[in-house]
Image: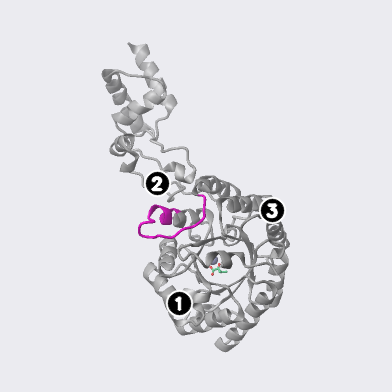
Amino acid sequence: MPQNRIQNNFASDKNRVLIFDTTLRDGEQSPGATMTHAEKLEIAHLLDEMGVDIIEAGFPIASEGDFQAVSEIAKITKNATICGLSRANIRDIDRAWEAVKHAASPRIHTFIGTSPQHRAIPNLTMDQMAERIHETVTHARNLCDNVQWSPMDATRTEHDYLCRVVEIAIKAGATTINIPDTVGYTAPRESADLIRMLLERVPGADEIIFATHCHNDLGMATANSLAAVEAGARQIECTINGLGERAGNTALEEVVMAMRVRHDIMPFDTKIDTTKIMHISRRVATVSGFPVQFNKAIVGKNAFAHESGIHQDGMLKSADTFEIMRPADIGLAGTSLPLGKHSGRAALRAKMRELGIEMADNQLNDLFVRFKALADRKKEVYDDDLIALVQDADTNE
Ligand code: KIV
Ligand code: ZN
């Protein structure tokens, strides 16, 4: 049976946070985000290259296509653990194992909804569900020594019952317990308290890794994930660009950069090569057909763009004035200072220099007046517009 690589490596470093990427599973569950087989292989390769610890490659029972994609990713991935999702039944688990078993480091992830809202669906009593959890996790663990178990909708599950089923899953052999905020309902303090409560109350909790899996329905997925880590969770489940069901999942780029930029107050380490973030963000946007919103943290078009005069002037003097990260940290060529009606003389002069046009102060003042008039009519003034303004001035002289 393959060794549980992650558990073994992880034990020695208490501040190491594992990054579990589910772009190819939860991300692909966004209505309309379906990716082709070749696109999934490409994204898995990029995730592996950037240092993701675990790739949830799909839901093998869901379709023949998903099964094939997970199997292929399992065969070709070099570093990451490859995980396949399954519901809490033997057929699903066997299918997930069939798909991941060729990986150098395979993982089975099995789940069942434990909240009152979700227990009603399979029509199981609490005791029957507990028995099902014991049977299915035991079955998964007999196939694979790396088993993740998730009580779906954990954040709306009664605490006593949650502790009870988590203990059952640990005793049955789960090595990672994931705590999903399936409907994006929790808030940072509650997210932390839940992990702390489980660590304190559940026997054997210190032997396994707790994961946090947040959805963004109230815009708090990143904050909730980081709060869970501060309380002791050591795996964050996330997707590129926050792709995922409804309002999406925790965005990988946000949690990774938050822990890097604010390492002073969140001293947690991942092994993500952040300079690969921008490229994978663009590829996921393209293959999923989900464009990234302009003002999205880290990877949005405007995340490193400054239009107002005060900001541009500050940025031209020192990048520290209005940027807390360097564009190069995420693999972006540089800051952009788009020229618009809020821009000032300093940025206009810098742009003209960049275009190879040196101007005396009076020429620049004259250009500035005409540039402002144009900027009032146009959202953004491009290089060609500026060159035309200069040529107009030359002709009128
Ligand atoms: O959001 C969720 O609860 C899930 C589970 C399958 C882990 O995606
Ligand atoms: Zn989810």
- Pick whichever, 161 or 122, lies toward us: 161
Which of marks 2 and 1 precedes in the sequence? 1
Q: Is residue 311 above or below residue 260?
A: above
Q: Is residue 293 visible?
A: yes
Q: Is residue 35 above or below residue 61?
A: above
CA distance separating discs 3 and 1 = 40 Å
- Label 2 beta carbon less than 8 Å to ligand 2: no
Q: What x and y, as percent, mark residue 35?
A: 64, 53
Horizontally, is 268 left or right of 20 in the view? Answer: left
At 40% from the left edge and 34% from the top edge, which residue is drawn?
380
Horizontally, is 152 left or right of 372 in the view? Answer: right
User: Which residue position is annotated with label 2?
Assistant: 325
* Residue type at numbered disc 2: Met
User: Which residue position is annotated with label 3?
Assistant: 37
Q: Is residue 78 above or below residue 323?
A: below
Judged from the image, the quadrant occupied by ligand 1 is: bottom right
Q: Quadrant of the C terminus?
A: top left
* Residue type at numbered disc 3: His
At 68% from the left edge and 68% from the top edge, which residue is drawn?
96
Secondary structure mostly taken by the magenta-highlighted segment of the chain:
loop
Which of marks 1 and 3 precedes in the sequence? 3
> Mark 1: few, some, or many residues within 10 Å (few <14, many ≥20)?
many
Q: Secondary structure at mark 3?
A: helix
Q: What x and y, as percent, mark residue 369?
A: 29, 25
User: Which residue position is annotated with label 1?
Assistant: 199
| Magenta-colored stretch includes residue 269 | yes
CA distance separating discs 1 and 2 = 34 Å
Q: What x and y, as percent, mark residue 143?
A: 70, 73
* Residue type at numbered disc 1: Leu
Q: How many marks on residues? A: 3
Q: Is the C-beta separation of discs 3 and 1 under 8 Å?
A: no
Horizontally, is 309 left or right of 297 in the view? Answer: left
